[in-house]
Amino acid sequence: RGARPSGVLVEFRDTRCKLLGQGVYPGGRGRPVPALGDTLASPASATAHADSVPMRGRVVARHFQLQAEEDGTPCVWVRLVVAVPSKSASRAEGARRKVCFSLN
């Protein structure tokens, strides 16, 4: 059996690489992993807020890690690093939104 995507961890970072927030999306959802340069918008658990806030930026790094499920089945977790423009980094809390990928 081949490896299957088990989930995606998204890290939103400012221009100085400071972590602004994270989102975890278990399951592959049948979607391709965003490419470098793609725009990604998603609610994230922000480090400065108790609730999720909408964040948007460009994918600047992708990391893939092969792991094994409890039953030994191979799976892949993906970590995306998303650079948030400085004007968006201080955005106030907003309504929850669905994950949205650009079509780049």
Image (tube, rainbow, N blue to C red):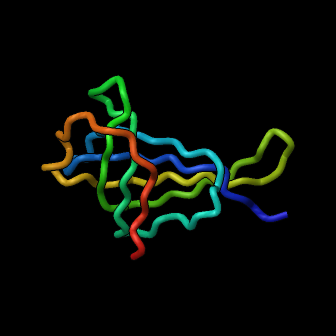
Residue found farthest to the bottom: 104
Task: State the image coordinates of residue 22 (x, y, percent, origin top left).
Answer: 41, 40
Task: State the image coordinates of residue 94 (x, y, percent, origin top left).
Answer: 28, 38
Look at the picture and state if 58 lies above or below 50.
below
Task: Say which of 36 and 46 sits in front.
Answer: 46
Q: Residue at x 43, y 63 (%)?
A: 101
Task: State the image coordinates of residue 15 (x, y, percent, origin top left).
Answer: 20, 51
Look at the picture and state if 8 lies above or below 92.
below
Query: In the rendered image, is residue 60 in sight?
Result: no
Relative to 87, 57 lies left or right? right
Q: Residue at x 61, y 49 (%)?
A: 7
Quadrant where the image shows the C terminus: bottom left
So how many labels did they put on this image? 0
Task: State the image coordinates of residue 27 (x, y, percent, origin top left).
Answer: 65, 49
Look at the picture and state if 81 lies above or below 101.
above
Relative to 34, 87 lies left or right? left
Relative to 9, 19 lies left or right? left
Q: Residue at x 84, y 46 (%)?
A: 72
Q: Residue at x 32, y 37 (%)?
A: 53
Task: Say which of 9 and 92 sits in front.
Answer: 92
Residue found farthest to the front: 95
Query: In the rendered image, is residue 68 in sight?
Result: yes
Quadrant where the image shows the N terminus: bottom right
Residue found farthest to the top: 50
